[in-house]
Amino acid sequence: NMVRRQVEKSVAKNLTEMIGPARSYKVRAYGPTLRMVEGKLDGLDIVGIGVRLPNKLTLARLDVKIRDLTVDTDNHKLTRVGATSYCVSLDQSELCRYLTGKYPDVPGLKIALREGYLTVSAKPGISRLRAGVQVDAEIEVRDRRMLALNLTSLKVASIHAPGFARNLLESKLDTIFDANDIGYDARVDSAAISPGLLTLSGSLDLMKAPGKTAGATANAGR
């Protein structure tokens, strides 16, 4: 109906400022019309494609589901949110860019996303003495914040010194992704790898400014 479309349009106007610029955003509002007139919604779904976060991280796709919220339709802002879940996808090229920026001291670092695992390549060493290292590993969620390599599943593909490869990963590549880089006090509940894509899901708090980590208030959805 017209009221719902107006509310969706109002929220959409503020998404670039609230989350970041994107190739596109779609918004879907839920709830009784009379409550929507007052800016009160039962739910709101946001889908963003090519979303660029304030820290320059670009998400291939962002899905956010908010339940029980209030919208200031005059200022196009969310004023209160209830339980909020998210699902984000990072493509392989963006994850590689992210990791080379995070670990500039790992020469030749590359990541390839497979089905259920990833391949890490690097060329540690000095000058011509660099040794090519390639390992396959699964990932695991730690502390609802970080994605780390599961070294129990590590397989060394290109050298005969698995201890050397393990030491490289343990000392240099402790974290594949940190939810702090999403912002909004994001928490990670699950992570999955498919060919060319890393997908994370969990909860966040859109009322917190991007880049702020866990602090004084807890996410209403937790």
Image: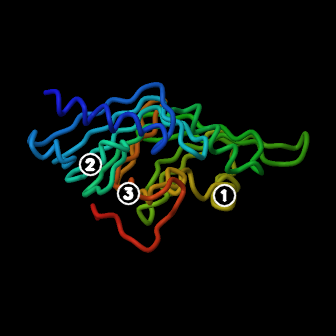
Q: Residues within 10 Å of mark 3 (few under 14, many from 20)?
A: many
- Indicate the position of residue 204 as horizontal and vertical percent values: 37, 55
Q: How many angstroms separate mark 1 from mark 3 (CA)?
A: 41 Å
The image quarter in which residue 194 lies = top left
Pick whichever of labels 1 and 3 is earlier in the sequence. 1
Q: Please state which amino acid type lies under the numbered disc 3.
A: Asp
Residue 72 visible = yes
Q: Residue furthest right?
A: 127
Q: Which mark is residue 163?
A: 1
Lateral position of residue 189 relative to residue 90, left or right: left
Quickly name the residue at label 2: 66
Point out the image quarter for the N terminus: top left
User: Is label 3 in a helix, a strand or a loop?
Assistant: loop
User: Is label 1 in a helix, a strand or a loop?
Assistant: helix
Quickly name the residue at label 3: 205
Up-down: is 22 above or below 43? above
Q: Which of the two discs, 2 and 1, sits closer to the camera?
A: 2
Lateral position of residue 146 relative to residue 86, left or right: right
- Indicate the position of residue 39 as horizontal and vertical percent values: 22, 47
Residue at the spot 38% in from the left edge and 30% down from the top edge:
25
Residue at the spot 12% in from the left edge and 42% down from the top edge:
31
User: Is label 2 in a helix, a strand or a loop?
Assistant: strand
Q: Please state which amino acid type lies under the numbered disc 2.
A: Ile
Residue at the spot 46% in from the left edge and 33% down from the top edge:
197
Lateral position of residue 151 relative to residue 191, left or right: right
- Indicate the position of residue 213 as horizontal and vertical percent values: 50, 64
Closer to the camera, 179 or 22?
A: 22
Lateral position of residue 6 relative to residue 36, left or right: right
